[in-house]
Amino acid sequence: MSQVLQRTSATGTRATKVIGALAILVMAWVVVSGLVLTPQDVVQGESVRIMYVHVPSAWIAYLAFIFTAVASASWLISKKHSMGFDRFAGASAEVGVMFMAITLITGSLWGRLTWGEFWQWDPRLTTTAFLFVTYVGYLAVRRLEGSVEQRARRSAVVAMLAVLEIPLVHFSVVLWRSLHQGATVLNPNGDVKMDDLMLFTLFSGVVGFTLVFVWLVLHRQRTMLLVDVANRQGLDAAIAARKIEGSVN
Amino acid sequence: MKDAGFIFGSYIVTLGAILMFAVATLRRAKDSSQSVDEKDKTWL
C-alpha cells in the first residue's frame, strides 16, 4: 500500500486523498453556487459574488496564522522541543500567506467595483497589507542560516508577536472610520441579514477553504520533514567525508 | 455584465493560486523524497 501511495505522491496518504477529494467537491459547489445560483445583492449587485472567495480566504488566513502562533508556543513550551511543532508552524504560515495574498487581490478587485479604486489607504486594507508583509517576513526569518533549532526558536518568537496583529486587523473597521464594511456574519449582535443560499454558499466556502488548508498543510509539513532529513543526511555525509580526509592527512 | 471580468478574475486568481501552491508542494515533496529513507517517512 505504501509503495502505491508513494508512486502517486511522496507525502500522500489515504486521509489526504479523502480530504483532497472532499475539498474539490466543496470548492466546485462554491464556484457554481457563487457564480450562478446565488442572487445578486440589493446594494452591490453582481460584485457580491467575490465575497464567496474573499471572505473565506481572509478567515482561513487568520486561522492559519493563529495555528502558527499556537504551534510556535507549543515548540517553545514543550521540553522535548519537537520539530513537528516547528514544521507545522512553518507550513501553516506559508499557506496563510497564500490565502492572505488571495484576500488582498480579490479584495482589490471587489474594491474596484464597489469604490471605483483598486486600493485605498483605509484602516482595514492597510492593516491587512501590514499583516501580509509581517508573515512574508516570518517566512524570510525561517530561511536564515542556522540549525533547525535556531530556525524554530527565531521564527517562534516572530510568530507569537505577529499574531497580535490579527485583532487589530479584525477590529480596524470598528476602531477607525473605514471604507470597508463591518462584519456581516461575525457581528456582535448575531443578527445576520443575508439570503439563506448566500449564507450557505459563504459557509460552504469556509468549509472548502478549510479542507484545502488542511490538505496543503499536511503535504507541506511532510515536505519540510523530507527536506530537513535530506539536509541532515547531507551534513552527516559531509562531516564523515571531512573525518576521512583528516585521518588520511 | 460589465463586472464579469473582475468577478471571474477573482475566482481564477483564487483557484489558480491554490492549484499552483499544491503542484509546487507535491513536486518539491517528490524531489526531496528520493534521497530520504522509508523509515523517515513517518506517515507511511
Image: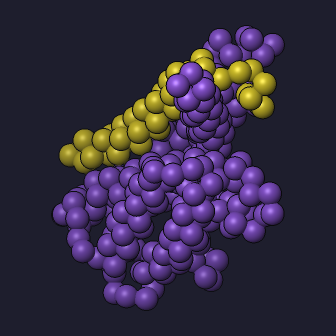
Chain colours: A purple, B yellow
B33 lies above or below A71: above
Q: Position of residue B24 (x, y in %)?
A: 46, 30
User: In percent of the image, x 74 and y 29: which residue is there?
Assistant: B40
Q: Quadrant of residue B5?
A: top left
Depth check, front residue: B38 or B26: B38
A30 lies above or below A249: below
Residue A62 appearing in the image? no
Depth check, front residue: A91 or A64: A91
Q: Position of residue B39 (x, y in %)?
A: 78, 25
User: In percent of the image, x 71 and y 16: which residue is there?
Assistant: A5
User: In percent of the image, x 71 and y 21: which residue is there?
Assistant: B37
Depth check, front residue: A219 or B12: A219
A131 lies above or below A190: above
Q: Quadrant of residue A2?
A: top right
User: In percent of the image, x 75 and y 68: which residue is there?
Assistant: A77
Residue B7 appearing in the image? yes
The total of numbered circles placed on residues is 0
Q: Position of residue A142 (x, y in %)?
A: 49, 53
Taking the image as shown, residue A173 lies to the left or right of residue A18, namely: left
Q: Position of residue A57 (x, y in %)?
A: 49, 53
Taking the image as shown, residue A76 lies to the left or right of residue A117, namely: right
Depth check, front residue: A99 or A36: A99
Q: Quadrant of residue A140?
A: bottom left
Task: Say which quadrant the N terminus of chain A sits in.
Answer: top right
